[in-house]
Image (cartoon, rainbow, N blue to C red):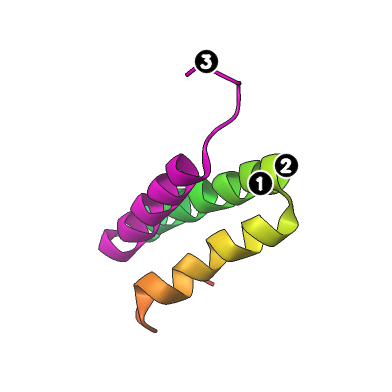
Amino acid sequence: MAATGKLTKSYLEREYKQAILSFKGAISENEQWQARKEMANLERCAAEMYGFQYADELHELTKELTNGTNKPF
């Protein structure tokens, strides 16, 4: 498969989930802030490449993975 210069949805989702886990496992506010910035960057990329609806879907993973604990937003 030829490279298209686009990040795939599966890559964005995998990285977003990792950022959420980093947030949940953070031991300082600085680490939480870094994880939040990563999630925001991924949401921005998702919106630019696939539209705002997909970025919103990506953001919904936050609720799914946090189960109400350590909510980043």
Magenta run includes residue 63: no
Residue 43 spot, x, y in % from top left: 60, 51
Q: Residues within 10 Å of mark 3 (few under 14, many from 20)?
A: few
Front label number (1 vs 3): 3
Say which of 68 and 55 sits in front. 55
Which of the two labelled residues, at mark 1 and mark 3, occupies the earlier sequence position?
Answer: 3
The quarter holding residue 45 reads top right
Residue 30 visible (yes or no)? yes
SS state under label 3: loop
**Main secondary structure type of the part rendered in magenta:** helix
The mark found on residue 48 in the picture is 2
Residue 36 spot, x, y in % from top left: 49, 56
Look at label 1 and name its amino acid: Arg
Residue 69 spot, x, y in % from top left: 35, 81
| Number of numbered discs overlaid on the protein picture | 3
Residue 25 spot, x, y in % from top left: 26, 61
Q: CA distance from mark 2 to mark 3?
A: 21 Å
Q: Residues within 10 Å of mark 1 (few under 14, many from 20)?
A: some
Q: Residue at the front extreme?
A: 1
The mark found on residue 2 in the picture is 3
| Residue topped by disc 1 | 44
Q: CA distance from mark 2 to mark 1?
A: 6 Å
Residue range of the region highlighted in magenta in the rendering: 1-26
Q: CA distance from mark 1 to mark 3?
A: 24 Å
The quarter holding residue 41 reads top right
